[in-house]
Amino acid sequence: MKNLTVFLSMFFVSLLLHSLSAQTFDKFKYQNISKIVTGFDEISYTGKYGKRMLNNSRTSLQIPMLPSLSEPVYFPYQSPNASFAEAFPVSLANGQILMVWKGMDTLKCAHSTDGGLTWGTPVVIISGGEWPGVISGIRTTSGRVLAGWKESSGLWLSYSDDHGINWSAPVSVTNNGGDGNCTITQTLDGKLWLFYHRWDSSTFEDIYYRTSTDDGLSWSSEQTFVATPLEERFGTVVSGNGSTLLAFYNNNDTGNFDIYMVTSTDNGATWSAPSPIVNSWRDESRPIVLRQANGDLWMIYFRFNPAPVLSGYDERDIYYIQSFDGGNTWTTPTQFTQYVGRDFRHNADLVGNQPFVSFISWRWGQWIYQQQIWYGQIGTTQDLNPPPAVFNGNATSLAPNDTIYIQAFVDDENSVSDVQMSYSVNGIPFGPVQMFDDGLHNDENPGDNIWGESIGSFQVEDFISYTFSVTDITNNTVNVESGSFDIRPTHNVGNIILNFRPNSQLADMNSTSGSNAFWPRVSGDDYLFHGGLWIGWNGLSDYRVMNVHYNDQDWQRTDGSTITLEEGLSDQDGNVTYDDQKAVSPSIGLQVRQESYQWSNSNRNDFIIFKYIITNTGENGDLSDLFTAVWLDPDVGEDAANDLGGYDSSRSLIYLKDEEGIPNGYIGLKLLGIEDSTYSRTIDRPDANDMDRYYHMTTGFPSIPTNPSDYQMLLTAQPFDLDFGYSDSVAFGLVMGGSLAELQANADTMKWIYDNELVVGIKDFVSREIPTKFSLAQNFPNPFNPSTKIKYSVPQRSNVTLKVYDILGNEIATLVNEEKDQGVYTVNFDANNLASGLYLYRIQAGSFIETKKMILLK
């Protein structure tokens, strides 16, 4: 039996050598070849009876019995609740495989001694720094392992000379934060090549490289590989036949990314004209090229493909091609992964003479877009039965008491047979609910793989999360946490649909349809991406700007407060209270009562008024020069970078529109009431620090931009002082219009309503003082233009009236007419529509009556 085994082994090797000489052997059939080196006298192979050596004058072969990775394998060292952005495998000189991967702020590696079936204890390469960007690595001919990655300061490298057990300190190779997508390769002359591309606004993306001749210890100066007005990325180089170098890269000169090759016969000093290698009408990206010792080449890349059924969505699959003649010709592309979701960000090395490929995939993820590390080996891994993919989930009609429509966007390489949804409300589970693709359940068209069904209704502040369970016709079932939403109070009785949140936020950039500012109501064009209240203060030598956009804890709903949305002074009054006590940065010490008003009447339904009643809670004592602003990030139409607007100083109105007129409308922001004069406004882009934001709030009137871009709007009221325990208010209006003239007319109507219907109805503001007697203070300022404050004290619960009269005794306004608890109150009086002159204001509380004079001087 032993003799028969030796004979069969000899016969197998003889056939293999014959096939090698003709270069026509089936690469997959002999997938366990790991190395081909010419010029030796031995053949080494490993079989059932151990390692054997056979004499031959041409080639040495090492043939390990690799495990069968018949399906893509999930890399074990990753949390199922996190996304891992990339990994790369390295075939080590000791026969092991090293996998290097990145987490949030770490770069780690682990070893496999059984061809990827199991992995040893992870080794930390770097930790505690930045989140490393796109990574790459290689084992050099000396056995050294190099790992490269991107940081905000440029590209960095670390190396290991003991198969990945210990690593050098990180070394900076480039110092440009725009450098990325590095690829490290080594040519037959021992030279290392580090390719990377750089993006800037003037040149788009170009490719550069550096070389090393001392095993990565030092690197040459930067060399330009390709720089054109087009976008180029993902460069790499490999040795071809003789002294020829082959370099590959992506560019988009045909309107989509294709893979091109250039050659050099002078060690990279000059390169040939590019020739296309893969150039279909789809995007092909990120060529990874591996060279076997006999010169055969593998190219692994990923390609965008349309989803099989789901229109408008694309899958990404990993493909490969081969060249047996030094890159002159290439085989027809073969698809390596079959999953209809996303398989991409691949890396590869030769293990057993076949590409061992790591990649990122959505497959079997617990939530949509979850990116996890998988791997397999070309020739062994077939990926014959991947799971279905969930491309998106959508929840619409998120207003209180509305039915919520849920859609699941799914697909499969075969066919989807069933979709069910489970959901929870404030942590209480419900379902499963059967979903349908019949065109009758808010699922759009029958058979389009958009499945739908409705749930609800819900109450304000309910938090709902939902999960899809998708099964294909081969009984693969994937459960995906699709999304979550909370029921927000939403203004929806007028021509604008707009939500507000218990933390000053207007619109919600992370929400689905119905939670941004939509106008007009019928067509639902999205005009506003995000917005909210800013309050800035430069006190105690410290710049502070409380705002929800850059720190969502700056404003948090006050404990015990409620959100209301009901008919009142307008057809739909909103009310919420929040403060800055949970701010991560030092708080100012403010509480805000936000009131909002919307009308349904056709002549006043294109605006929403927001009033902010701001109280000093005393954390920093009396406050001087508080700046209050509303910040908005409009994205009018589909192209956020195509907005342009202006400022109407006579109306304190800032506005934006889509420059191409798609949609044909304007979004405006206007100051109202006593603060109806602007201190500063901008449609610039503030940076993410308080000093810069405070600067934008307080530096006057910058010039109006003239070129379309993705602008933001900031409108700031005149500064005011606020003593401990006192309150003041400022009001803004969000206004829409189909033209600039219509926007201005709507803004004028909004101002009239605020001045004549809302100001008189404003509630006055109680301080923390405890009065011992009735009193009426002199108004301040006096004289005034056009507004002033009137302070009065109530020592015991009483019915209080406070009215304004002209000099003839005619009643002008009723500022207060209700029962008041003990306290000190301040009420604002706006005389914008009155003529200059002497006016009287009179208080009556029980038997207490007092009258004072004030002067309006315009």
Image (cartoon, rainbow, N blue to C red):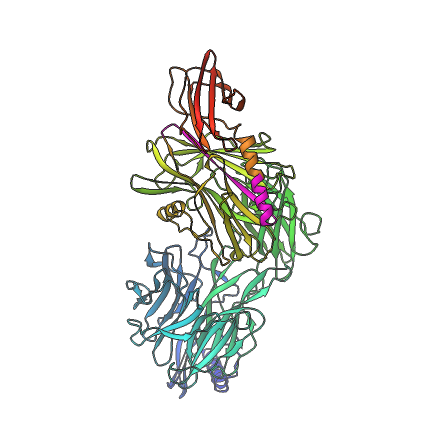
Q: Residue furthest top?
A: 847
Instruction: Give coordinates of residue 232: x percent, y percent.
Output: 46, 71
* 834 sits to left or right of 618: right
The one nearer the camera, 753 or 332, is: 753
Instruction: Give coordinates of residue 422: x percent, y percent.
Output: 59, 44
Instruction: Give coordinates of residue 511: x percent, y percent.
Output: 54, 47
460 shown above or below 410: above
| In magenta segment, residue 740 | yes
* 410 sits to left or right of 210: right
* Region in magenta: 723-748
The one nearer the camera, 607 or 269, is: 607
Q: In this view of the protein, can residue 292 be seen by the observer?
A: yes
Q: Quadrant of residue 735?
A: top right
The one nearer the camera, 458 or 69, is: 458
793 shown above or below 510: above
* 430 sits to left or right of 262: right
6 shown above or below 386: below
